[in-house]
Amino acid sequence: MINYKKEITLYLNKINEGRKHSIDKVIEKIKKTKKCCVFGIGMISYPIISAVKNYTDIKIDFLSDNDKSKWGNIYHDNLQCIPPSELEKYGEDIAILIATRHYKEIYKQLKDRGLNKIFVITEYRLLNNEYFKKESVIGTIKKNTLRLIDILEDEKSKEILFTLIKNWFDFDIHGVGYENIFTKDQYYPPDIIKLHENESFVDVGAYNGDTLLEFINRSNKEFGSIFAFELDEQNFKKMEITVNALDAAIKKKISLYNLGLLDEEKYVSYTAGGSGSESTCINVIGTATSKGKTVRLSDTLKNNKITYIKMDIEGSELQALHGAEEIIKKQKPKLAICVYHKPDHLWEIPFYLKKVVPEYKIFLRHHNPLEYETVCYAVI
């Protein structure tokens, strides 16, 4: 059995001695080249390119992709997609930034073309770069992760925790990666989440109804009720269409709310559109395009039976949990709370849940081959 406290301590001490992290070294190398190309035009590329533009002074010159239908088209406002074959003429004068989860396969493809300056930068590592540069951050991470080890229920959770920490500092094409820890059973890992008849499911950040449909299928349609919350009006309308297509017997057990969840009732600004519930960011300075209302879950559903709560709301999870505290404390529902949006949520959310319901068993699972979809599960 691995002594994760010892391993984490040794690793963070080593990081603290070096201080310059891989993300900063990558940015420096890219800036020294004459041209910069982002390879991959898909759902993941949009937040990565946005982060590169907003959090670095890297100038992206053009894009590339293996999809021939994209060649010659303009994406991301003003960037043209060129065929991969055209990259070869730039040789050592071009830095290629891979923006796809298939980064190892793309790396091999580009290396076979004789290209060498190939890098991967992930979205949240850029967004959180200032956090990781704080003078006291290593001590903060060490103190809290060592404490977190004590409340994690199984070895797999501890392995995931250590891997996540290493990826904060050493993720690159040849670095740690997530291949050994991610699973595709998000919100329903069979060793943690057991669904029973008449489950009452609260879907927070319900997007277009995809997780709602997954719950219906997982429960074999034998559930009590679903309460789905989605702040983004565009996504909410898509969810309405999804639910209206269901059988009447199923549809009558579903309640939809065009609301966000926080720890207070108020009107907020948020960025709209996007490809998932995680795209709806509340009060993002300079980017908010729409307005909506947030409420407390404990006020809105105070007279309802609740057995399972899932949350994925772009970093507002802790506030939403505070607004659900009365329900959580009284009913002790199963919980699946995303903890990947902010570094300190990795420990703050488990600590909070354990404080509210001391008998909760706490697990971590990771459900994506990149940095996304780390979930804290709490069950009795």
Image (cartoon, rainbow, N blue to C red):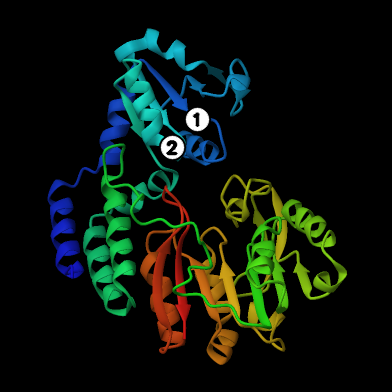
- In the rendered image, the residue lying farthest to the top is 89
Residue under pointer 1: 40
**Vertical position of residue 309 compared to residue 114: above or below:** below
> Residue 186: x, y in percent?
51, 62
Query: Of the numbered discs in the image, which one, if any, rests on residue 286?
Result: none
Name which residue type carries label 1. Gly
Q: Which of these two is toward me, 193 or 237? A: 193
Q: Which of these two is toward me, 333 or 93? A: 333
Q: Residue at x 56, y 24 (%)?
A: 67
Q: Are marks 1 and 2 in contact (CB under 8 Å)?
A: yes
Mark 1 element type: loop
Q: Residue at x 48, y 39 (%)?
A: 48
Residue under pointer 2: 102
Query: Residue 113 lies in what quarter of the image?
Result: top left
- In the rendered image, the residue lying farthest to the right is 248
**Vertical position of residue 360 compared to residue 339: above or below:** below
Marked residue nearer the N-terminal end (1 or 2): 1
**Vertical position of residue 365 compared to residue 39: above or below:** below
Decide if residue 224 is in sight here: yes
Mark 2 element type: loop
Query: Residue 201 lies in what quarter of the image?
Result: bottom right
